[in-house]
Image: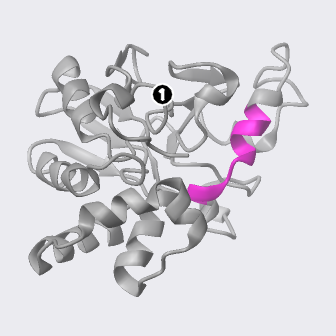
Amino acid sequence: MKTLVIGDIHSGFLALKQLLLRIEPQEDDTIIFLGDYVDGWSDAVETVSFLIDLSKVYNCIFLRGNHDELVYNWLLKGEDKPMWLAHGGEASKSSYQGRNKELLEEHMNFYENLQNYYLDKKNRLFVHAGFTNLKGVHYEYFPKMFYWDRTLWELALALDSSIGPGHHSYPERLKNYSEIYIGHTPLTRINKIEPYCAANVWNLDTGAAFKGPLSAMDVETKETWQSDPVHLFYPTEKGRN
């Protein structure tokens, strides 16, 4: 039994299929998806439908990303904010155009039931973006921070390598969990395209929405798998801006 974690997909359905073929998960494995299933490439509908079907075979845990909330709000209330449209929303709108009512209802149910975070039996936290409360996720005052926050990753990157969990200056926020797994902030911003750990925070967003691959990791062994760069599957598209 493995626990696998997969980073931000951003509608890269073809890359997701390739990644899973490379992983070859077993039916008793747990697969944790860190959110942002949509907004980016053209296969928003195909990606979500595939994930729904995948959950019928494997134990899947789906976390909520900020882009998932944006698409849900558009489907539910017609919200189409310019910033969203400019950062992948236009592709998701096009993917959903003309879809039948049954499919839309199934997808709405998927978005509604996404989890804000997941905490396993080994005190490992999985969350799309982060949290702000020093005491941990159970005390978070602002639930949207679970899928919008960037300060957790900034904090982890800012730590001097000589400061470990036992040091008095080690941030209280990070001491709450043995490990934290996030997506949300592309590692391409620090010129990395493989999962990267800063302090005890693993970032799995390897830039699938841009020029990077889609990535997965076995949380026990730290073995990683990656798709080909996602943009190669969609050569006529721009992806996210």
Front one among 106 and 239 = 239
Residue 176 seen: yes
Horizontally, residue 105 falls left or right of residue 117, namely left
Residue in the foreground of this view, choosing between 196 and 226: 226
Few, some or many C-alpha atoms within 10 Å of disc 1 (few <14, some 14-19, many ≥20)?
some
Q: Position of residue 9 (x, y in %)?
A: 37, 41
Q: Is residue 97 above or below residue 28?
A: below
Label 1, secondary structure: give it.
loop
Q: Nearer the viewer, residue 184 or 97?
A: 97
* Residue 115 visible in rendering: no
Q: Position of residue 128 (x, y in %)?
A: 52, 48
Stretch in magenta = 146-156
Is 179 one of the magenta-colored residues? no
Q: What residue is drawn where x is 28% and y is 38%?
A: 31
Q: Residue at x 36, y 45 (%)?
A: 41
SS majority, magenta: helix
Which residue is disc 1 drawn over? 211
Does 236 appear above or below 26? below
| Residue in view at x 19 percent, y 77 percent | 105
The location of residue 170, given as percent across then percent down, is 83, 31
Looking at the rendered structure, the kind of residue marked 1 is: Lys
Q: Residue furthest front?
A: 236
